Image (cartoon, grey):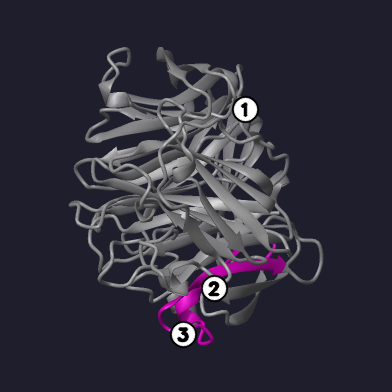
Amino acid sequence: MAALARTRFAILLVGLLALSLAPLTAPAGAQTPTPAATATTAATATTTPVPTAIPTAGPTLTPGTGPAASTLYVPLILNRAAQLETGVQVQNLSGATATVTITYYDQDGRTVPQWVETASVGPNASTTFYTPGNPNLPAGFVGSAVVQATQPVGAIVNQQTQPDASPFYVGTFVAPHAPATSVFLPYAVKQVGSRSSTITVQNAGTVPANVEARFFTPDGLAGRFQVFVPALASRRIALADRPELPGNMDAAAVLLSDQPIVAIGDVYDRSTGIFQLSTGDASGATSQLAPLLFKARGGWDSEIRIQNATSSAVTVRVAVQPTGGGAQITTAPVTVAPNSPYTFRPADVPDLASGLVASAQVQASGNVVAVVSQYNVGNRTGMVYNAFDPASATPRLSVPLIFKDRNGFNTGVQVQNVDNSDAQARITYTLSTGATAVEFAVVPAGGSYTFYQPDNDQLPAGSVGSAVVENIAGGQRLVAIVNEVNYARGGDASSTYEGLNY
C-alpha cells in the first residue's frame, strides 16, 4: 500500500507557500497570530507600525556566491493586484538563529521603512512573509523585494490568485541569489493556442538597467524589444501585449542587461486554467537532471523544455530511467539551434511505456538550460520545475515547506541520486508545533525515491513544517523537487519547487 501511495503521489505534485497555513476562515496563505502561521514556532514575522511614509535608499546588498546566500531576490511581489497575491517562504540553512529582513520596492524602485518586515528564524526553520498580511503595503501593490539575512538562507515564492478569485491557480519559483547580465527562459510563448507567457525581470543592481529581451524559435530570432528597469525594481512583460512579437510564437527568451538581473517566466493557458511558473537560468550546463517525469500516468504527462544557452548549435540526448528499476532508454541526438528551444515529450517516444514514472538526464554538447512541465489536462492542473545542473548537487538539501492533510494539501519530496551507487537518505521534519520526525530510504544509483508525507505515521494530520534531506552513508549527491496538490480546492491548485542544495 505504501508503494501504491507513493506512486499516487508521483501523480500528485507540490509547493504552495501559504495556502494551507491559514485557518479555514482566513484568506488562503494568510499569516495569523498563532505559531501555525509559519513553518516553525521559532519563525515569527513582524511588521513595523505605520508612521509617515518617507522614501528611503535600498539596503546594502551582499550577492550570494553558493547554493545558500545571505541575499536573495524576489522579482515579483503582488498585494491583491488584479486578483493576484504572493507569499515568500524563507528557510534558515544554518545551525544558528538568523534575522531575516525583506525590503519591498515598487515599480519605480522606491521603498519606505513601513514596508519592511523582519523575522527571527531558528536553525533549519522557516517563516512566511505573506504579502496581503503586511498591513503597510498599499492595496494593489505590484513590485519586487530583496531578502537579507544574518545567516545563509533560501526561499520559495508562491504566486496565486486571491482566495475568492475564479478560476484559481498557483505557481511557485525559487528566489534567485546569483544575478547575472544574461538570463535564459526556455518558455516564452505568445498566443500559442490559448497559451501565453509573462516574463518578470528584476534589476539587482544599484543603478537603472537597460534590458534587451530577445526571442528565438528553431528558425532563429523571432523578435526583440528593450525595457528600462530602475534599481532593485522589476518589470512584468506580458508577451501577448507586445506588438514587436509575432502571434503563435513558440520561443525561448534571452534577457541581456547592462546591470545584473534575475527573472522568472510563466505560461498561462486561459482555456484550461493551467498556470506554470519557473526561475530563469543564468548560464546552463552540459547536463541537466529531471527527478520526475510521466507518460500517461493517471492522466499526467510531462515534457522537458530544453534551451540552447550558447551561440552555436548543440546536440541533445535525453536518458530516461524508470522509477523502481528497468532499462534506461536514451533518445537519438537532436540538433538545437543557438538560443532556441527543443521540447522532449515522453509521449512521442514509443519505447517508453504508458504509465511511466521516471527520472531523466539531459545530455548536450554545449550548455543548455531546462525546465520540466507536468500537466493533467483532464483535471485542469499543472506545474513546472527547473532541472538541475549535476554540479549543483550535494549530499544535503533543504525543503522550506511540507504538508500532511493541511486544509486539503499534501506534499511529497522526490529525491534523485546523481551518482552511480545507492544512497542512504534521511529526511528530518521540523513541524510548526516544534515536534520533529525522521524517515529513511535507499535512493538507487541514478534513480529516485519519493518521501510521501501522508504515508508517514509520525506526522499527524494537519502538519505543516520544513525538512532537511541528508545522505547519511557516503558522498552520493542528491537533488529533489517538492510537489503539492489539493484536488478539493478546485482550479489549478498544484505547484512544485526545487529543493535547496547547500
Question: Residue at left 65%, top 40%?
Answer: 287
Coordinates of residue 99 in the picture (x, y in percent): 64, 56
Q: CA distance from mark 1 to mark 3?
A: 43 Å
Q: Which residue is mark 1?
A: 180
> Type of residue at label 1?
Ala
Residue at screen point 28% across, 40% down:
140
**Please, what is the three-letter code of the amino acid marked with disc 3?**
Pro
Identify the residue position indicated by label 3 in the image.
460
- Sequence-wise first label, 2 or 1: 2
Q: Contact, CB < 8 Å: mark 3 with mark 2? A: no
Segment tinted magenta in the rendering = 444-470
| Disc 2 residue type (three-letter) | Thr
**Where residue 269 appears, x then y in whole percent?**
26, 41
Q: Within the magenta stretch, is there residue 327?
A: no
In whole angstroms, how far apart are the C-alphas of marks 2 and 1?
Answer: 36 Å
Q: Is residue 417 above or below residue 115?
A: below
Q: Which residue is mark 2?
A: 41
Q: Is residue 271 above or below residue 245?
A: below
**Which is more N-terminal, label 2 or label 3?**
2
Residue 279 vertical placement versus 379 (above, below): above
Badge 1: residue crowd in 10 Å (few <14, some 14–19, many ≥20): many
